[in-house]
Image (spheres, grey):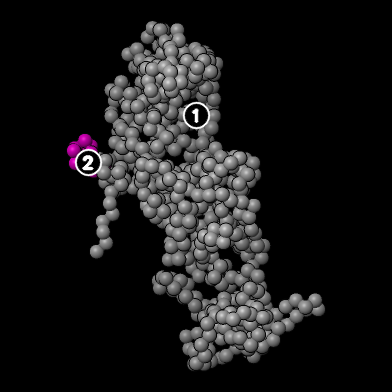
């Protein structure tokens, strides 16, 4: 019997709250800002929030934190919804912080009435200077002495659009000597005359994250508001607002964000890669975005498995991207259809094979009997990989060489009899003989060979383009590497093979299928592909080639 998996610290909190009767139902939320595409770090948060609700019979809201109209767009909203669904989750409610603009505005007036908020006309640099330093207290300016009536009027006029951007802000009145700099009269609202992707031009003042987030949680009766560690200093303000507004007591909990080798987790930097043309777009298969990984062929199950394996911690650490690739290989090994594809062809002629053709039977996936078998055309002329032949091989070389025998996958044993060259001495083809009695599944030859090669019938071969993707960066810890992060881009992160030869089954296969090209790697059809020009992305190699490079170094 397998041991029951231990609870992470957030699950322990949830179970304690439920046992104490603090809540009867668990309600979580995933609150992305629609200012870019989601990345693998967001996948960890998605799996955590939706996973908690599922485990404890609760629900999860998808709430868009759309309080900054300058950077947000409907395109990002749609991409986020696609990513969450692709990962295998469905939200209870699709909500937006902008749904609550009227209520947040009313909350701000409530703080004004209680003498806990005021309108400040100071410039941003003045406000920053007046906040003091971590070792010295700040000081309030004269605007903090405005009456509640005056503040109500000014705030209403801000709402009406009477003032330009940056001329006034609404601040909370808390403690200018607090050891937490965020509690030194933080800004709650700013003026921003910008078109909003949902509310249009209805508003010209927008709440700050710290004012919108906790109150949105409270409005939705979120029981466990889960954030990453950088929001620890924000928790005090989160609690202060909820307490003074006397609303549902949502509470914030923090966990370590995902940091991964050879990867960046900043939407700003990912956007820079797109804008500067280092990648083809947000869904470039080299990107750490969920859409990029989906296009590359990563199964959603593999990403969920990865997030489960790394767990939920309170301390930051750097996760090896090799673990993600391991999870991808493990999933693909179980579900990928096997196909034969020759990357660098060398023609092989079976001189004693009769004219015509036959079909050999081979399995679609030896790990999955339900995947069945397929018929592959076999004929007198075949392509094999050029690297699978060596004219002067070393000892213990088990592939093809003059006078040496190998088995062709699911077909026959062959022997190389003659090497054919062109006028310049380059090898153009191999003349071989086959053993008719050695057919796979009915072999009576009694001959044992150690090498098995994949192949494609020349007459039946179809062509395709391959895009071989590798890690986008050359250094492990990109975030802490010297210089600009773009200085560390891997120039070999994409190699294009314009023409390979494949068995014809690829023309009939489902475009959503994943493939293992035998002995070459795992591949997935790209969105650029069409019946006249098949394009495949390499999802991951069969083995961790980077580990070998590290050992060499």
- Disc 2 secondary structure class: helix
Q: Going by the image, does 268 lie left or right of 16?
A: right
Q: Write down the quadrant of residue 451 in the picture.
A: bottom right
Q: Earlier in the sequence, mark 2 or mark 1?
A: 2
Question: What residue is pinned by disc 2?
Answer: 16
- Disc 1 secondary structure class: loop
Q: Image height check: is 118 above or below 433?
A: above
Please report the residue visible at 64 percent of the width from the left and 41 percent of the height from the top. Answer: 276
Foreground of the two, 62 or 135 = 135
Which of discs 2 and 1 lies nearer the camera? The answer is: 2
Q: Going by the image, does 459 lie left or right of 165?
A: right
Rendered-image quadrant of the C terminus: bottom right
Give the magenta range.
14-24
Q: Write down the quadrant of residue 382 in the picture.
A: bottom right
Badge 2 density bin: few <14, some 14–19, many ≥20, Cα 10 Å: few
In the rendered image, residue 216 lying in the magenta stretch gets the answer: no
Rendered-image quadrant of the N terminus: bottom left
Question: What residue is pinned by disc 1?
Answer: 68
Q: Are marks 2 and 1 in contact (CB under 8 Å)?
A: no
Please report the residue visible at 37 percent of the width from the left and 52 percent of the height from the top. Answer: 308
Q: Write down the quadrant of residue 3 in the picture.
A: bottom left
Q: Going by the image, does 131 lie left or right of 4?
A: right
Measuring from the top left, give residue 335's x and y in whole percent.
Answer: 44, 65
């Amino acid at each position: 019997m397998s041991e029951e998996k231990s609870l992470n610290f957030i699950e322990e909190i949830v179970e304690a709250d439920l046992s104490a009767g603090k809540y009867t139902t668990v309600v979580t939320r995933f609150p992305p800002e629609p200012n870019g595409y989601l990345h693998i770090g967001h996948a960890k948060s998605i799996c955590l929030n939706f996973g908690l609700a599922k485990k404890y019979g609760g629900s999860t809201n998808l709430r868009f934190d759309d309080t900054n109209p300058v950077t947000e767009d409907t395109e990002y909203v749609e991409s986020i919804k696609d990513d969450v669904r692709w990962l295998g989750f469905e939200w209870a409610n699709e909500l937006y912080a902008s749904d609550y603009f009227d209520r947040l505005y009313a909350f701000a007036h409530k703080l004004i009435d209680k003498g806990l908020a005021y309108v400040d006309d100071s410039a941003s640099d003045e406000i920053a200077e007046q906040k003091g330093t971590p070792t010295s207290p700040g000081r309030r300016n004269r605007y903090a002495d405005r009456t509640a009536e005056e503040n109500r009027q000014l705030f209403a006029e801000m709402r009406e659009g009477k003032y330009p951007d940056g001329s006034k802000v609404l601040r909370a009145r808390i403690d200018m000597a607090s050891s937490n700099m965020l509690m030194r009269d933080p800004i709650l609202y700013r003026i921003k005359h910008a078109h909003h992707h949902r509310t249009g031009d209805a508003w010209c003042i927008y709440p700050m994250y710290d004012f919108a987030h906790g109150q949105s949680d409270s409005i939705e009766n979120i029981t466990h508001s889960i954030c990453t560690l950088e929001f620890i200093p924000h928790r005090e303000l989160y609690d202060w607002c909820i307490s003074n507004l006397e609303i549902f007591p949502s509470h914030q909990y923090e966990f370590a964000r995902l940091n991964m080798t050879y990867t960046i987790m900043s939407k700003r930097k990912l956007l820079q890669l797109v804008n500067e043309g280092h990648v083809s777009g947000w869904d470039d298969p080299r990107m750490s975005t969920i859409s990029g990984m989906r296009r590359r062929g990563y199964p959603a199950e593999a990403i969920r498995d990865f997030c489960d394996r790394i767990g939920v911690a309170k301390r930051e650490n750097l996760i090896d991207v090799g673990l993600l690739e391991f999870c991808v290989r493990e999933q693909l090994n179980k579900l990928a259809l096997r196909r034969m594809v020759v990357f660098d062809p060398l023609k092989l002629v079976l001189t004693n094979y009769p004219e015509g053709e036959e079909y050999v039977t081979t399995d679609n996936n030896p790990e999955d009997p339900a995947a069945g078998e397929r018929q592959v055309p076999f004929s007198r002329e075949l392509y094999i990989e050029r690297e699978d032949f060596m004219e002067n091989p070393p000892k213990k070389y088990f592939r093809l060489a003059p006078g040496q025998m190998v088995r062709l996958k699911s077909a026959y044993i062959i022997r190389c009899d003659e090497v054919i060259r062109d006028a310049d001495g380059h090898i153009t083809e191999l003349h071989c003989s086959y053993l008719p009695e050695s057919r796979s599944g009915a072999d009576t030859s009694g001959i044992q060979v150690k090498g098995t090669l994949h192949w494609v019938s020349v007459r039946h071969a179809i062509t395709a383009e391959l895009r071989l993707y590798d890690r986008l960066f050359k250094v492990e810890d990109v975030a802490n590497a010297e210089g600009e992060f773009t200085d560390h881009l891997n120039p070999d992160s994409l190699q294009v093979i314009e023409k390979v030869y494949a068995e014809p089954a690829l023309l009939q296969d489902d475009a959503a299928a994943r493939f293992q090209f035998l002995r070459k790697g795992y591949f997935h059809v790209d969105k650029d592909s069409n019946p006249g020009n098949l394009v495949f992305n390499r999802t991951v190699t069969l083995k961790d080639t980077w580990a070998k490079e590290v050992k060499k170094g």
